[in-house]
Image (tube, helix red, strand yellow):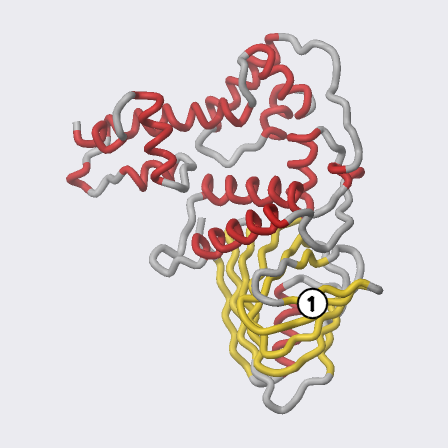
Amino acid sequence: MPVETFELSTREPDIAQASLTELYGLERPLGFSGVDSSFTCQIRFAAAGDLGADRLRFSASTRCTVPPLDTFMVASPVGGASRYVVGRQQVNMRPGVLFRCPTGMPFSNDWHDVDMSTLRLPVAVIERVAEERLGVPATDLRFDGLEPVSEPMRRTWLGLMRFVHQQINDPASGVIHTLVAAQLTELIAATALATFPNTTMTTAYLPETGGVAPAVVRRAVAFADGHASLPITVTDIARAAGVRPRALQLAFARHLGLSPMSYVRRVRLESAHRELRTADPTTGDTVAAIAARWGFARPDRFAAAYRAAYGVPPSHTLRT
């Protein structure tokens, strides 16, 4: 999957304002006020599929009024200071502080020579993950707070944010494998649900009851086997099997003793094993490339999983 990028450096507030409005797909123009003559703006947008990692740099004091967003986005300064205002709430920003930009309502921010890092993905992705993993209907999911629920979760999100920026903005490749991008997106959606206050933390949802026929599991397994090379989700597998995601998860736990996505990862590991057995390192085949092709972004974790399954490191299989 190619990484789509857009870069802009300008001293014209009108150009920066129009560019940000278009890039974020805002229905109403973003507004600047209180801009002084030393204004400069540098923008770097980067996206791999649903996942976006951006950097915004403003060299002067600027107030920015943002119309309602329809994207889940978290901002954190790399340098400089800023203040975000949502209604009567204020969040004073400095490096390491996280701010979840609200969706569906306007907000403003005061930038003072700031270098801002952001991470964004569609709200629909988080809604799907909430239903698949927690059984929460999309209509019941709502984010409430603007800051992380705890210091450990702040550190977790910040580390993940830095990792995603590193992956997407790696100038050596300009691409990120489709399966890797999909798994990163799933990880960020799940981490968002654990990091920022939302209704999944305050409402108890009971698992679906009732049995699921073994034939449903067989259909799901057949679909997963045939589509493991694609960025499939639990919702995709459940749709193919004719059940809801939560029912499919319960059925897999009951009949196979693992989750649907754990099964998919096992299929991908087996596929990588077969490819390693037939690959030729003299023609440029590498463990890292084969691992990435099957959705394993971290070669060290792939090597550990491979050794646990096959008793040897993947490099041994490639050489032999």
Q: Is residue 319 above or below residue 121?
A: above
Looking at the rendered image, the quarter that the C terminus falls into is: top left
Circle 1 residues within 10 Å: few <14, some 14–19, many ≥20? some
Q: Disc 1 marks which amino acid?
A: Asn
Residue 14 found in image quarter = bottom right
- In the displayed structure, 258 sits above or below 34; it is above
The one of 34 and 1 positioned closer to us in this rendering: 34
Q: Residue 286, how many percent across, how many down?
A: 25, 40
Q: In this image, 301 relative to 78: left or right?
A: left
**Residue in the foreground of this view, choosing between 180 and 164:** 164
**Residue placed furthest toward the front:** 151
Question: Which quadrant holds residue 217?
Answer: top right
The location of residue 72, given as percent across then percent down, is 67, 52
Image coordinates for residue 182, horizontal then vertical, percent: 52, 41
Secondary structure of the residue carrying numbered label 1:
strand
Name which residue lies at 53% across and 64% down.
45
Q: Nearer the viewer, residue 165 or 202?
A: 202
22 vs 220, left or right, is right
Q: Residue furthest bottom?
A: 37
How many numbered circles does the render carry? 1
Residue drawn at x 70%, y 58% as measured from the top left: 101
Q: Residue at the spot x=19%, y=34% of the render?
A: 280
Q: Residue furthest right?
A: 88
Please state which of residues 152 and 290 is positioned toward the viewer in this rendering: 152
In the image, residue 252 sits, relative to residue 10, either above or below, namely: above
Query: Which residue bears the numbered disc 1?
Result: 92
Residue 2 is situated, as x and y percent measured from the top left of the image, at: 44, 53
